Amino acid sequence: MSETIFTPGAEVVTPRGRGQVVDVRATASGKFVFGIEDADGEVSHFTEKGLRLART
């Protein structure tokens, strides 16, 4: 289990760049998927392994 908690509004870094968590959902397998909105307004979904908290 990760010690990092991604909550809505958190700034994160993804393989596609920086973004903000806008949605958190559980999958049938028990994992969480995070909806990340980038600066252009596009929302992409990532698992916890594809995210890092952004340093401010």
Image (tube, rainbow, N blue to C red):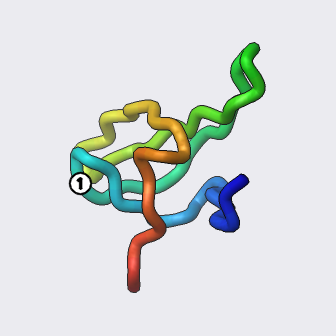
* Residue extending farthest front: 1
Residue at 23% x, 54% y: name it: 17
6 above or below 45? below
Q: Position of residue 37 (x, y in %)?
A: 40, 44
Residue 1 x %, y %: 72, 53
Q: Quadrant of residue 24?
A: top right
How far across and down, in percent of the image, does residue 28 sit? Answer: 75, 14
Query: Which amino acid, by three-letter code, is at mark 1?
Result: Gly
In the image, taking residue 56 as reference, residue 22 lies left or right, namely: right
The C terminus appears in which quarter of the rendering? bottom left
* Left or right position of 27 against 55: right
In this view of the protein, which residue sits in the foreground, 39 or 11?
11
Horizontal arrangement in the rendering, residue 56 relative to residue 38 (left or right): right
Quick one: which residue is furthest to the bottom in this view? 56
Closer to us: 40 or 31: 31
10 Å crowding of disc 1: few (<14), some (14-19), many (20+): few
Residue 28 to residue 17: above or below: above
Q: Which residue is mark 1?
A: 17
